[in-house]
Amino acid sequence: MKTSYNIALIGTGYIGKTHALAYQAVNSVFPDTPKLVKALVVDINEAAGRRFADQFGFQSFSTDWKDAINNPHIDIVSIATPNFLHKEMAIEALRAGKHVYCEKPLAVSIRDAEEMADAAITSKGLTLVGYNYLCNPILQHAAQLIQSGKIGKPLFFRGVNDEDYMADASVPHSWRCERKLAGPGTLGDLATHLISLSEFMVGEVASVSGHLYTAHSMRPDPNDKSSSKPVENDDVVSMVVEYANGAHGELSSSRIAWGRKNRLAFEIHGDKGSILFDQERLNEIELYCATDDAANQGFQKILAGPAHPAYSAFIQSTGHQLGFNDLKVIEVRNLLDGIAHGKPLYPSFADAIRVERVISSVLQSADTDKRVGV
Ligand SMILES: NC(=O)c1ccc[n+]([C@@H]2O[C@H](COP(=O)([O-])OP(=O)(O)OC[C@H]3O[C@@H](n4cnc5c(N)ncnc54)[C@H](O)[C@@H]3O)[C@@H](O)[C@H]2O)c1
């Protein structure tokens, strides 16, 4: 078994920093994990990329992502660039036999995502997609509660994923507003997390009915403040879903929800109880069991602690709280352990393609005003 892996990170923006922090922390938090070597970082922005390389102690820096592919010493290629770049980078890395750790969503279209999933089937490299919320210890526990039958058969999932990063109509146009660079808007950016969580908790989505809405159809051109550019994708998405196991759900997501900073929240109602979660309070769930003594029935708050998967690697006391960046540390631990021990990674490209199919069905449903099978 290899005891050390060289990683190349492509993209040093918002989530690139969370990746680099996780690469720094993973061997300290999880000492039994194979050593991760920060071998190469790539960004087309040379000044920012070089600063980033120094800040995090990467061994080398490049402005050309193909250096990550062509370097035989790189074991893992991590893709943290805008969505339209994922496909080419991932497929080339897989063809070169690298393991690929790719940010969500997989791609800007279902066709591109399917090509990526196909490339993964024939590659010796493993794949992992950055649905980091699935790594939350308290959500791992929630999933175990559901599997153990604590709330009975899941009947209904109601979820939202709201933020306000584009609520201000004067936020300039960016790659996130263009179909060919981002794919769908909120649907691809935020609702993907919600869909992945809902499938993790309840099961596979079988059909959807979707509605999309663009509230701010023009945004200021960042290169010429006196003009504006069209927004080509959704600010808000709503969907009614049916799961293959017969459960139903209602999912909605917005990037223009003033005051909501990371409200990735859901309720799952089973035939014997309910579970509630809100990412803005990511260290707790609330559990209601209809089988409890009637005099004491009510929502019970469960705080994350050492009894929950991976939590104790960070701190020994319940309620002392993990944060968003810690979820990425757990994700990177999963990546390294999976690669070293040949354990299946979740969600791999083969798993994450399901989210892309749901997205594609929502787009089709919104276009045709009809319910669409996934
Ligand atoms: N898992 C999560 O919770 C999460 C959160 C935010 C973003 N993301 C995903 O991460 C990806 C990146 O999003 P972001 O918010 O970090 O974007 P960003 O715009 O902040 O950063 C993107 C970086 O990629 C660099 N880049 C662009 N083209 C490049 C190229 N050809 N070669 C090398 N570098 C290049 C840019 O210079 C920039 O530094 C997206 O797919 C997004 O959906 C995931």
Image (cartoon, rainbow, N blue to C red):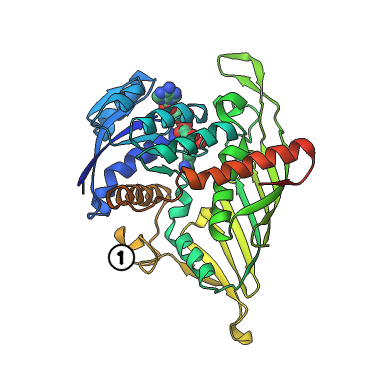
Tell me residue 238's x, y (percent): 70, 46
Indicate yes or no: mark 1 CB to ligand 1 under 8 Å.
Answer: no
Residue 178 visible, this orientation:
no
The image shows residue 240, relative to residue 98, as above or below, that is below
Left or right: residue 46 versus residue 353 is left
- Residue kind at label 1, given as amino acid type: Gln
From the viewer's side, name the closer residue of 290 and 297: 290
In percent of width and height, residue 250 lies at: 69, 54
Q: Residue at x 42, y 60 (%)?
A: 137
* Viewer-side residue, 55 vs 140: 140
Instruction: Identify which residue is drawn at 55% across, 60% down.
Output: 201
Residue 359 appears in which quarter of the rendering? top right
Looking at the rendered structure, the secondary structure element under dot 1 is loop
Which residue is more in the foreground, 348 or 8? 348
Compared across the picture, whether 295 is left or right of 105 comes to right
Ligand 1 found in image quarter: top left
Residue 45 percent across, percent down from the top left: 39, 20
Measured along the vertical axis of the image, is residue 16 above or below residue 2?
above
Q: Is residue 104 left or right of residue 311?
A: right
Q: Residues within 10 Å of mark 1 (few under 14, many from 20)?
A: few
| Whole-percent x, y for residue 24 in the image | 27, 42
Q: Is residue 38 visible?
A: yes
Residue ranking furthest to the front: 122
In this view, the residue in front, 320 or 44, is 44
**Residue at point 42%, 64% (across, down):** 304
Pointer 1: what residue? 316
